[in-house]
Amino acid sequence: MIDLYTASTPNGWKASITLEELALPYEVHAIELQKNQQKEPAFLALNPNGRIPAIVDRDEGDFAVFESGAIMIYLAEKTGRLMPSDAKGRSRVIQWLMFQMGGIGPMMGQANVFFRYFPEKIQPAIDRYQNESKRLFTVLDGHLKDNEYLAGDYSIADIANWAWVRTHKWSGVEIDDLPNLQRWLDLIAARPAAQKGITVPVDLALLQKDDSEEAKKFAEEARKMVQR
């Protein structure tokens, strides 16, 4: 049994989708970021960095893993699925996983901060992070022109990038001119495990409706967190 400590964010979804795809039994422990539960001693014992997600593998002596990408690699290697075992195949998956962790995630995250959450609209910063997010989307689109998935068969690389890219509207970045990326987004969105994973611990469909009252409330709560 896996204990999953998470919240409804793209990084959290990376872990929950992976668990769903692997059909591993897991118990959800929702972390309320607005209440700063990720900074409490009990959680810091699992993740010293105070960020979600984190897991505890009860079957391995309560082994704790933090960092979303590390969690995905651990679960894939534990089950022998969603990542090839040969060196080259494994490397291809990890390359695209690192692409998300070093590029897509940080750039979209900063686009969210400056476009959605900061009360002051600093246009050069908004332009910087939206433009870089779009550039990275274009890289994905170019690669997906001749590839169904990012690294051969469907893998944790696809899950990681999809969990973020699917929220592109929240970052203020459109992808109408990137048909290969849209095809890939739709392909993964049709997977039952992906559909279930993005509702853990709660469904944030509001990200697709950025003018709703719920979305405005969500942005206000996020604004408080990023200014702490």
Image (cartoon, grey):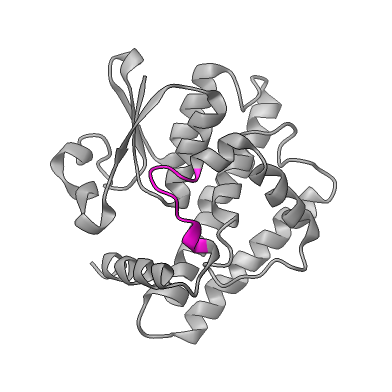
Q: Residue at x 68, y 35 (%)?
A: 92
Question: Which quadrant of the figure contains the N terminus?
Answer: top left
- Image height of 121 relative to 80, above or below: below
Which residue ends up furthest to the right in the rendered image?
146
Q: Residue at x 73, y 56 (%)?
A: 182
Residue 110, image quadrant: bottom left
| Magenta stretch encompasses residue 184 | no
Specify whether 135 is left or right of 222: right
| Magenta stretch encompasses residue 205 | yes
Q: Residue at x 68, y 51 (%)?
A: 185
- Image height of 90 relative to 174, above or below: above
User: What percent of the width, then of the height, locates residue 220?
Assistant: 33, 72
Specify whether 144 is left or right of 26: right
Q: What's drawn in magenta, residue-wise?
A: 198-207
User: What percent of the width, then of the height, locates residue 158?
Assistant: 64, 41
Residue 190, image quadrant: top right
